[in-house]
Amino acid sequence: MIASKSPATLVICATVPRQPVVPRSGSWLDVARGVPVPVTWVAGVDSLAALGGRMEGLDLAIDLPPAACGSRTRLRDLLSRSRDAAPGIAAAVLRGPMPADHRRLLVDHGIAVALVDAFDDDGRGSRRPAPRGWACRNAVWGLWEVQVTPPRRRGVLGWLGFGGLSRPRAGSLHVLRTEGLHSGNNAATFVASRLERWMEWANGHRARGTAVVTELSALPASLAGAGRSALAGSVLRAA
């Protein structure tokens, strides 16, 4: 079947370090721009403001803590500040449950995709179709929610950071989130071990043609295209 040949889609999200990044930003940004596969960098609003426009060219997601997810006032403030620091930001990571009416604020501030640990049980289905088996939903027009792929395997592979994803199924979606880069005492910047392993794993599947690696911010366009195709029998509907 054609569907069996469709590559998996892999998204890797890595958290920007919380420590002050301005003195070491040149080294940090050089490492971030030199990674072998696309990575979405998850940053708090203070990190975005500290780096200013120096993160241009990197895919960014605003890190929204539980307090912001639950407070409309705090959420509006963080979203406004993130837009000032990074005007093109279109992705967010939600660290806690969010009331349905708060999601409209995300859309109003240009957020088109939000990464979540689990979907809120608010009775809302998906307004637009997604490929079968993809943990995504469009509960509010203009916003896709995408669920982090949970680990599927314990033991040695889980400890190494592969999380049971060593052989992604054709046509599937895997969204991985981990720590990103950190700085040593001598101001050198290092790639976190799990992120390094995941990038090598993703790059290997990309080289073999069994997966495509994309950024979190690019998923809405992919999902919109997949949704249109799904109505006519999308090849993304894996067997």
Image: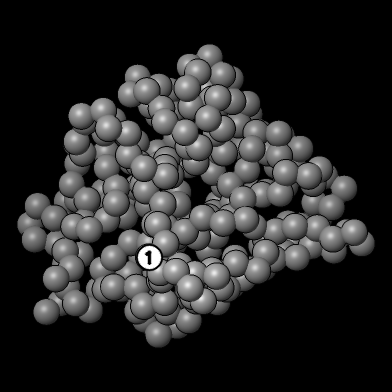
**Quarter of the view holding residue 103:** top left
Q: Amino acid at mark 1?
A: Arg
Residue 187 relative to residue 94: left or right: right
Q: Is residue 166 visible?
A: yes
**Up-down relation of residue 233 to residue 228 (above or below):** below
At label 1, counting other C-alpha atoms closer than 10 Å, the crowd grade (few under 14, some 14-19, many 20 or more) is few
Of 194 and 88, nearer the camera is 194
User: Quick one: quadrant of the N terminus?
Assistant: bottom left
Q: Position of residue 79 (x, y in %)?
A: 55, 27
Seen at 21% across and 31% down, the residue is: 124
Most foreground residue, 114 or 55: 114
| Residue at 55% over, 70% down | 159
Q: Nearer the viewer, residue 78 or 169?
A: 169
> Closer to the camera, 79 or 133?
133
Q: Is residue 141 visible?
A: no
**Element marked by disc 1:** loop
Q: Could you say where residue 228 lies in the image, as x and y percent from the top left?
A: 17, 51
Q: Quadrant of the C terminus?
A: bottom left
Left or right of 69: which side holds 178?
right
- Extreme residue toward the top, this view: 73
Q: Which residue is mark 1?
A: 152
Q: Residue at x 80, y 58 (%)?
A: 183
Q: Residue at x 74, y 62 (%)?
A: 30
Instruction: Find residue 167 and report its horizontal and vertical position in percent.
Output: 36, 78
Asked whether, in this view, residue 192 is left or right of residue 119, the answer is: right
Q: How many marks?
A: 1
Q: Quadrant of residue 115?
A: top left
